[in-house]
Image (cartoon, coloured by chain):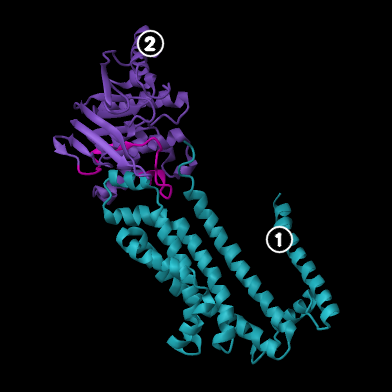
Amino acid sequence: MIRVQNCRLTYRTPCGHVHTALDHVDLHVDEAEFVCVLGPSGCGKTSLLNLVAGFLKPSAGVVLFDNMSVAGPGPDRGVVFQDPTLFPWLTVRQNVEFGLRNAGCAPDRLAPRATAALAAVGMRAHIHKHPHALSGGMRQRVALARVLVLEPSALLMDEPFSALDANTRERLQDELLRIWDEHRRTVLYVTHSVEEAAYLADRVLIMGPPPESIKDEVALSLPRPRDRASDEFRAAVQLLRGKLDRLPCCVVET
Amino acid sequence: MKSHSLITRVLVPVALAVAVWYALALVVEAVRGVDFPTPLDTARRLAALLAGDPLGDHSVYRHIGDSLLRWVTGFVIAAVAGIAVGLATGWSETVRGMVAPLLHGLQLIPGLAWIPVALLLFGLGETATIFMIAMASFTPVAISVMDGVNRVDTQYVRAARMLGAGRRALFLCVLLPGALPALITGLRIGLGHGWRVVVAAEMIVGAGTGLGYSIIEARWTLDYPSAFACVAAICVIGLVVERVVFARLEQRTLARWSLARDSS
């Protein structure tokens, strides 16, 4: 489904140095698989996601999606950003309709489809509000609805819940898993939180700074729904934290 | 709370201005021995003018109306051209590379410096006045819109492209609304520049009517209270349009638009 082969991403800093954000990245995400990329802040996780999304082009190597080289962003790979980036001048429903319009949806189907997508994330009551009237958690629900309504074959998520309070974050994680379970979409989910990776992922890729960006890989076979208080879950968290702690990079945030 | 802010924001500044003006009038009369119209003289004259006293060959309403008409005409021309140029330069990097230096150069030319150009292009009269107003209003509008389009958050552009937006949708549904606050700010600044130039242009380009023309005429006839009354009228009209009408519009858009990236 998603395949990144021997990718490198470099850019030139304003003072003329060449900075390597990613190097030797090889990864694949299978159809309907939920993969978390776990790593400390600043190790290039978001850059990796931007490559798969098509916002950035690799300096070397290839990014394949459905066996096609990624040429640019598109609605087949729905991105949920860390910041919801809803369009402030549109209402909640218009934000969700935006992608549908681009996809050539019939005008009389716009409102029903957008409303249904918003109902699926619990935002049925807020469709006429503007984003500024919503809380952070509600905005992120809308951001999720606006990509889900386009029925993407993959979801790319960039620390989508990291700015939310703990309770909202856990509830949104549960909802995400419920939605994922219903439609079995492929998910590539970037996070710096060990608990989040252990709770969500089928497989966790441990990421660190170049020259070898992907450091390790852990398959999690815990059955879902996972119990955050269980010994097995604690053990998985410990395992991931141990691997993260061995990285030479910055501070590990949990 | 509200009445308190009205007092501090309107009454105190007005009282302060009147007090300084009075003091100045007294000092000038004492030192130079000339009649310097006091706020009271000016208010009386203004009231008389508003009651129908002619100013030059026309009523004060005719002068005000003509000045406003020139202002609006010049401003509308400038706004349409400025928005078009601003959108084009903000949207296309190639166009921006070529046109932005010109705009920044134009910005450095004071409105009145266009007088010789206006006279050579159009001769004395109405068209020259409107040309000068349009030139003064055009650059702030164009530059604001250009910067506004250019500064629309790249994350919005990324989100739109990820949601399948083509160039048309990106422009109409993201860049244009994203630049709206800057556009309104540009219009407000352009309007202010235009108003300043109306008055000056009327003084020099020979319009025959208008508040600026009346100030010069009143000076020739040594009717200083009338000149002062015209200055007061100019000030009040400019303030009302810029502060009351435009600032409110600006605040309303900003309140909604700036929401954006705060909560995280």
Q: Which chain is cyan?
A: B
Residue indicated by mark 1: B10
Vertical relation: A106 (above or below) A37 = below
Q: Secondary structure at mark 2?
A: helix
Provide residue A67's location: percent of width, then percent of height.
Answer: 13, 35
Vertical relation: A69 (above or below) B142 = above
Q: Secondary structure at mark 1?
A: helix
Q: Which is the main secondary structure of the residues drawn in magenta?
A: loop
Mark on residue B235? none
Residue extent of the magenta highlight: A71-95
Vertical relation: A123 (above or below) A251 = below
Q: For residue A111, what is the image quadrant?
A: top left
Residue at 69% from the left image edge and 87% from the top image edge:
B218
Side of A109 relative to B244 (left or right): left
Instruction: Give yes or no for residue A76 being in the magenta stretch.
Output: yes
Between A68 and A207, the one nearer to me in the picture:
A207
- Which colour is chain A painted? purple
Residue indicated by mark 2: A234
Q: Chain of mark 1?
A: B
Q: What's under tag 2, amino acid-wise? A: Arg
Q: Is residue B211 visible?
A: yes
Q: Is residue A111 visible?
A: no
Q: What's under tag 1, amino acid-wise? A: Val
What's the distance in space between the residues labelled 1 and 2, CA to CA? 65 Å
- In the orientation shown, which residue stands out farthest toward the left? A67
